[in-house]
Image: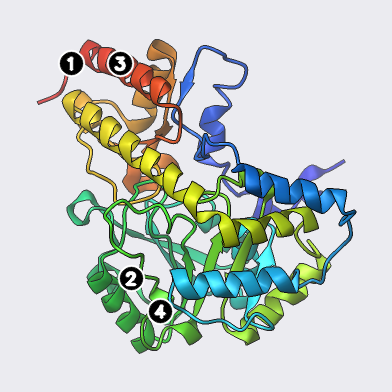
Amino acid sequence: MDWNRILSKQVVELPRSGIREFFDLVTGSKDIISLGVGEPDFVTPWNIREAAIFSLEKGHTTYTSNLGLESLRRAIAEYVGGHFNVGYDPACEILPTVGVSEAIDLALRCLINPGDEVLYHEPVYVSYAPSVQLAYGKATPVETSIDDLFALNPAKLEAAITPRTKVLMLNFPTNPTGSIAPVETLRAIADICIRHDLFVLTDEIYSELRYDGQKHVSIASLPGMKERTLLLHGFSKAFAMTGFRLGYACGPKELIELMCKIHSYTMICPSITSQEAGIEALRNGTPAMLEMRESYRMRRDYIVKRFNEMGMDCHLPGGAFYTFPSVKRFGLSSKEFATRLLKEARVAAVPGTAFGACGEGYLRCCYATGFNLLEQACDKMARFCDSLKPQA
């Protein structure tokens, strides 16, 4: 078999996930404390699990409409209207998907023609650029820096736009930096998108996990943006439902209709069990979410303090459950530092370069893990940093 002839060059040339590549080293090791994979350490709240169990007990084991359960779409519309202050018609402007990842894939395939450019801010979640490449588009990063607390600088965004630019991808709060976008920054970005006729995909999966006491603002809610924005959200992070694989897209009916066309040929619909659990999460999941958020806030404050004490300069992230400490003073690359930290201290963190070239000099550390494990990890990391000779 001539695999060079048989296999898709588009997929063969796709880089492996920097997260998964690094954590292959962790597999099978039981003495390692992981600050790696971005997943809540909380079990899905009982009332949501009970809704899933009751769904099965009632024998709800069939396909649903490609558009998902009408009751779920109505619950999404009500929740999004309150949380994001944007109104969507549940009949034609909302599509439940198999996680936000499917929604991103569907949207890009519906928006991109070969050679179209998609801008995204970097460091950012590892799947954005590969998803663009799989849709035969050109993924172009716009670098962010600690000077802007890793928020997207509007001037840098405008400078990156070319005649082939069609789409801007946003993710605030951001994985891996925990960055949030100030409202004035979002307004400037919205103005740029309107002037250059750009469409926006905004992934706001961490929107409930903000720690500054401010109400989350979506770019979709700003004047002139609803018609040129696809709002992506889901249940994984706020409601600790990663294994349910349930997300949704809200946007113009013209785009939702096309996305549903592909969806009907591929995934058909999310699991009905997950959909019925999602209804319960949207209607009655907020109290548990707020308790989890407060726990994350306490962990964030603790780990950032510890990192700064050990010489890993770290800003206080405004959202999500990640820190992005600098390791530049130790004279090692991100990958070298992370590899030695794993081998010598038995603590796993992700090199910043997994999220883009401008992540060099940083680590992503997830604090969605037990407080006692965070304390142990920080103690091990402090001893490891002490063993290194900081560079002037």
User: In the shown orientation, is residue 30 left or right of residue 217?
Assistant: right
Give the x, y percent position of residue 378: 31, 21
Q: Earlier in the sequence, mark 1 or mark 2?
A: 2
Give the x, y percent position of residue 93: 62, 81
Name which residue type carries label 1.
Lys
**The image quarter in which residue 103 lies:** bottom right
Q: In percent of the image, x 75 and y 69: which residue is there?
A: 68
| Cα distance between the residues tagged 3 and 4 | 44 Å
Q: Earlier in the sequence, mark 3 or mark 2?
A: 2
Please name whichever residue, 382 or 110, is drawn nearer the observer in this view of the structure: 382
Q: Earlier in the sequence, mark 4 or mark 2?
A: 2
Could you classify mark 1 by the number of other residues whose Cα lies within 10 Å: few (under 14), some (14-19), or many (20 or more)?
few
Name which residue type carries label 3.
Asp
Q: Earlier in the sequence, mark 1 or mark 3?
A: 3
Instruction: Assign a secondary structure to mark 2.
Output: helix
Please name whichever residue, 181 or 349, is drawn nearer the observer in this view of the structure: 181
Residue topped by disc 1? 389
Q: Quadrant of the N terminus?
A: top right
Name which residue type carries label 2.
Ala
Kindly indicate whether the residue at mark 2 contacts the one at mark 1 (C-beta within 8 angstroms).
Answer: no
**The image quarter in which residue 315 lies:** top left
Instruction: Assign a secondary structure to mark 3.
Output: helix
- From this view, report whether residue 112 is shown above or below residue 298: below
Kindly indicate whether the residue at mark 2 contacts the one at mark 3 (C-beta within 8 angstroms).
Answer: no
Kindly indicate whether the residue at mark 4 contacts the one at mark 3 (C-beta within 8 angstroms).
Answer: no
Name which residue type carries label 4.
Ser
Could you classify mark 4 by the number of other residues whose Cα lies within 10 Å: few (under 14), some (14-19), or many (20 or more)?
some
Residue topped by disc 4? 221
Mark 1, mark 3: which one is toward the viewer?
3
Q: In percent of the image, x 81 and y 65: which residue is there?
A: 268
Residue topped by disc 2? 160
